[in-house]
């Protein structure tokens, strides 16, 4: 996908693999200077090297995102690297433990809500006002189709992302009048390192949608890049399903 993000700084969380890595590389290919965050320094350095080899610019910030203080620290670091501002924020980092509600430990609950909800909340709290002061910006939250679909074993994950989708709309109302666009993508089954353990179940889930196949990380990244770019200048507060048509057949039942 061809986009023009020249002169802009983008922060992508969870950017060392899967959708986050593909998104970081796509934004960099569009001319953005990309700040990548993640836990694995070796994989982060590899993504930065690949971006540089393709003619782009990026830096990696290692760290464990889990709470407000870690989110604020990352926001500060990204602004410093971006010469005072971040123009694009992609809230991609997340965890998706599967299992029965009865087997969920409180520590698991706190960890999922911490990374999937609290971290995006405080990254936006830090960066959106600065974007407004700088003349505008774009925030893209990565959700999931199970934020709209009740699925056994995915209650906690789906609930965390459903809350993120509501925040997408609330932040649009709050920051949209100041030039900050906030949108979300809701991927369907996508082949990544994180979903590899699902094995054939991933293909079976994808087979129920009109597309009949699993998405690639790049297909999701292209949707994120679109929402981050000026091509989506009049798009605000939407949750864009990138699910192979699953939502269409569900809504027609």
Image (cartoon, rainbow, N blue to C red):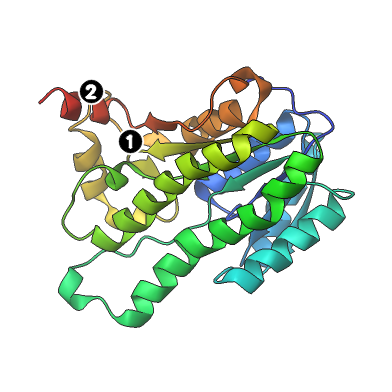
The quadrant in which the C terminus is found is top left
Vertical arrangement, residue 197 with respect to residue 109, above or below? above
> Which of 175 and 204 lies nearest the eye of the viewer?
175
Left or right: where 55 falls relative to 213? right
Q: Is residue 85 above or below residue 118?
A: above
Residue located beneath label 1 in the image:
214
Q: Is residue 36 visible?
A: yes
Measuring 33% from the left and 35% from the top, which residue is drawn there? 214
Q: To which quarter of the image does residue 136 belong?
A: top right
Question: Does 64 sit above or below residue 244?
Answer: below
Q: What is the distance, in whole Å, between disc 1 and disc 2 at their CAs?
A: 11 Å
| Rendered residue at 73%/62% (across/down) | 61
Q: Which mark is residue 210?
A: 2
Point out the residue furthest to the right here. 83
How many residues crowd mark 1 within 10 Å: few (<14), some (14–19), many (20+)?
some
Tell which of 44 and 188 is nearer to you.
Answer: 188
- Say left or right for 64 vs 183: right
Which of the 4 quarters of the picture holds residue 155? bottom left
Q: Position of residue 31 (x, y in %)?
A: 78, 30
Q: SS of the residue at dot 2?
A: loop
Q: Residues within 10 Å of mark 2 (few under 14, many from 20)?
A: some
Mark 1–mark 2 contact, CB under 8 Å? no
Note whether 124 is above or below 241 in the view shown: below
Say whether residue 195 is visible.
Answer: no
From the viewer's perspective, tell me whether residue 203 is left or right of residue 165. left
- Between circles 1 and 2, the one closer to the viewer is 2
At which x and y percent is residue 97? 33, 65
Residue found at the very far left of the displayed protein: 253
- Mark number displayed over residue 223: none
Q: In the rendered image, which quarter contains the N terminus?
A: top right
Of residues 49 and 164, the one nearer the viewer is 164
Instruction: Name which quarter of the figure residue 110 lies in.
Output: bottom left
């Amino acid at each position: 996908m061809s986009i023009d993000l020249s002169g802009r700084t983008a922060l992508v969380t969870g950017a060392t693999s899967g959708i986050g890595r593909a998104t970081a590389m796509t934004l960099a290919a569009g001319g953005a200077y990309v700040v990548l965050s993640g836990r694995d320094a070796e994989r982060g350095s590899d993504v930065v090297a690949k971006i540089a080899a393709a003619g782009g610019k990026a830096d990696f910030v290692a760290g464990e995102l889990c709470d407000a203080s870690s989110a604020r620290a990352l926001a500060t670091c990204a602004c410093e690297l971006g010469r005072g501002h971040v123009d694009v924020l992609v809230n991609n980092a997340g965890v998706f433990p599967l299992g029965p509600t009865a087997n969920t430990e409180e520590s698991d609950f706190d960890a999922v809500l911490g990374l999937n909800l609290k971290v995006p909340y405080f990254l936006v709290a830090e960066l959106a006002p600065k974007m407004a002061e700088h003349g505008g910006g774009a925030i893209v939250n990565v959700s999931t189709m199970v934020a709209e679909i009740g699925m056994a074993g995915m209650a906690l994950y789906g609930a965390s992302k459903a809350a993120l989708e509501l925040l997408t709309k609330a932040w649009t109302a709050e920051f949209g009048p100041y030039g900050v666009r906030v949108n979300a993508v809701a991927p369907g089954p996508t082949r990544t390192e994180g979903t590899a353990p699902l094995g054939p179940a991933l293909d079976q889930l994808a087979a129920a949608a009109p597309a009949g196949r699993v998405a690639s990380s790049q297909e999701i990244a292209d949707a994120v890049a679109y929402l981050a770019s000026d091509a989506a200048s009049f798009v605000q507060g939407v949750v864009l399903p990138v699910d192979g048509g699953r939502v269409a057949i569900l809504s027609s039942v």
